[in-house]
């Protein structure tokens, strides 16, 4: 398991609150996030913030050869499965 360094976490936080929550999707920001992901040498990434899937899609995951786990999608499917099994 890998986590971003403290400066990388600060940068991701700045991106989320300074851009993504304001609806700003920038290609250079996407490249920076993908560079952080690539630097970790991991197979998958948990997109643990609801704004991250807006800039890092499953198409980007495939291109990077990674699995992106969208927590909103995971929770939505779990809630639906629970509702339908009741």
Image: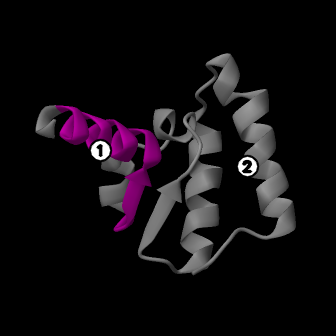
Image quadrant of residue 86?
top left
Residue 15 placement (x, y as % from top left): 73, 39
Q: Mark 1 sits on what residue? A: 78
The quadrant of the picture occupied by the N terminus is bottom right
Chief secondary structure of the magenta span?
helix
Q: Mark 2 sits on what residue? A: 12
Residues shaded magenta = 64-83
Q: Measure the C-alpha gap from mark 2 to mark 1.
A: 27 Å
Q: Earlier in the sequence, mark 2 or mark 1?
A: 2
Q: Note whether 10 is above or below 24 in the view shown.
A: below
* Crowding at mark 2 (Cα within 10 Å: few <14, some 14-19, many 20+): some
- Foreground pick, 71 / 78: 78
Secondary structure type for disc 2? helix
Q: Note whether 73 is above or below 47 in the view shown.
A: above
User: Residue at position x 58%, y 28% from top?
Assistant: 25
Q: For this view, does 67 lie left or right of residue 55?
A: left
Image mark for residue 16: none
Residue 68 placement (x, y as % from top left): 40, 57
């Amino acid at each position: 398991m890998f986590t971003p360094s403290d400066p990388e976490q600060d940068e991701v936080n700045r991106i989320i609150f300074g851009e993504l929550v304001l609806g700003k999707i920038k290609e250079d920001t996407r490249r920076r996030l993908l560079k952080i992901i690539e630097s970790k040498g991991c197979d998958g990434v948990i997109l643990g913030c609801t704004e991250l899937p807006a800039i890092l899609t499953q198409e980007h995951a495939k291109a990077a050869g990674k699995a992106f786990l969208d927590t909103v999608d995971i929770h939505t499917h779990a809630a639906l499965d629970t509702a339908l099994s009741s």
